[in-house]
Amino acid sequence: MRVLSGMRPTGKLHFGHYHGVLSNWLKLQDEYECFFFVADWHALTTDYAEPGRIKDNTVEMVIDWLSVGIDPAKATIFRQSHVKEHAELFVLLSMITPLSWLERNPTYKEQLQEIKDKDLHNYGFLGYPVLQTADIIIYKAEKVPVGIDQAPHLEFSREIARRFNHFYGEVFPEPQTILTSQPKVLGTDGRKMSKSYNNAIFLSDTPEAVEQKILHMMTDTARKRRTDAGNPDVCPLFITFHLLYSDEKTIGWVREGCTGALIGCTECKKSVIPKVLAMLEPIQKKRKAYEKDPDRVTAIIEEGSAKAKEIAGVTMEGVRKAIGLEAPERSAVNR
Ligand code: TRP
Ligand code: SF4
């Protein structure tokens, strides 16, 4: 079974990405034929005016993938813009995409509302899910692991695949969503961890920076003094770090200590920091090796892109044939 997923190149990844996406990819790569790619064209749909960071972000992000253990020997790692077949399929799919389907896309409407610092009234941004559909079905991927926010896009992809098959014959399987369980990962200010909120702890932060960020992380805001009882279930530090990194015994100790005002928040934080740093250590060791050898990273991306291109090329031959766009046979040309 073929699994495919992509990420826009936003740069360095943080703990939210790790627990929400990468840990799932790590499991999947051992079980299925996986394709993981950098959606750099998708990044351009919003960042077309300042494309400068996209290239560096691509390498940064793939270094994070490799450092956590995404393995090019198991999974095909590639860059969307280096497999131009995606663009050809995107054009063809755009012919059969009703505008109304795009205009009612909840992600589209939300982002138009929310993102005010960029003009998103461009054709590419409206067509975002069409390109995403091309990304998926060009590999005839059956499973697509994504977070809940992407579910409407996947629904759209199934509808387009169905519509294509209806017009031109059974070419594409309808891709199924694997909804990845996304544990709550909160940032230092207690909101959802996100680069744009400036509250993220990155996989590439130095151990000192990680320690400082955790020490300054928001806790149960109602607990003002050491003598006040606290509630771990509303404490961002507890939810994000103890629940994901501490053993049962420590969690019990925190619950008792916090609700009984027996421990201080600093003490509580200090008990989890070593576990977080221990998880990061092997990741950062691998990161250093890749940082020293950027050519190797580029080679991994290019080898993966070549492999992806072969598969995409075979699909596109079938697609052209189904629509009647295939190259003429030699004999027909000579006649
Ligand atoms: N839209 C996805 C995101 O923002 C990225 C993406 C692009 C994607 N193409 C894809 C994800 C294909 C899964 C499959 O996260
Ligand atoms: Fe949070 Fe721990 Fe402080 Fe309780 S003691 S509020 S769980 S940091």
Image (spheres, rainbow, N blue to C red):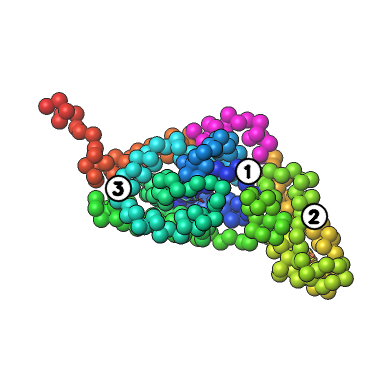
Within 10 Å of the Cα at label 1, are there few (<14), some (14-19), or many (20+) other Cα atoms?
A: many
Q: Secondary structure at mark 3?
A: helix
Q: Secondary structure at mark 2?
A: helix
N-terminal-most mark, 1 or 3: 1
Q: Which mark is residue 215?
A: 2
Q: Where is residue 331 drawn, in percent x and y?
A: 15, 29
Q: Which mark is residue 273?
A: none
- Between the C-alphas of marks 2 and 3, the distance is 54 Å
The structure residue drawn at horizontal position 36% and vertical position 57%, both measured from the top left corner, is 101
Q: Give the main secondary structure, helix, strand or loop, of the magenta stretch.
A: helix
Can you tell me whether the CB of the residue at mark 2 lies under 8 Å from the nearest atom of ligand 2? no
Residue 157 locus on image (x, y percent):
39, 55
The residue wearing badge 1 is: 12
The magenta region covers 286-302
Please state which amino acid type lies under the numbered disc 3. Answer: Met
Mark 1 near mark 3, Cβ–Cβ under 8 Å?
A: no
The answer to whether any part of residue 311 appears in the image is no
Q: Earlier in the sequence, mark 2 or mark 1?
A: 1
Left or right, 87 with respect to 236, comes to: left
Comes first in the chain, label 2 or label 3: 3
Residue ID at (57%, 53%): 21
Q: Amino acid at mark 2?
A: Leu
Position of 196 with respect to 212 (left or right) is: left
Dot 1 beta carbon under 8 Å from ligand 1 = no
Residue 185 drawn at (x, y percent) = 65, 58
- The image quadrant where one finds ligand 2 is bottom right
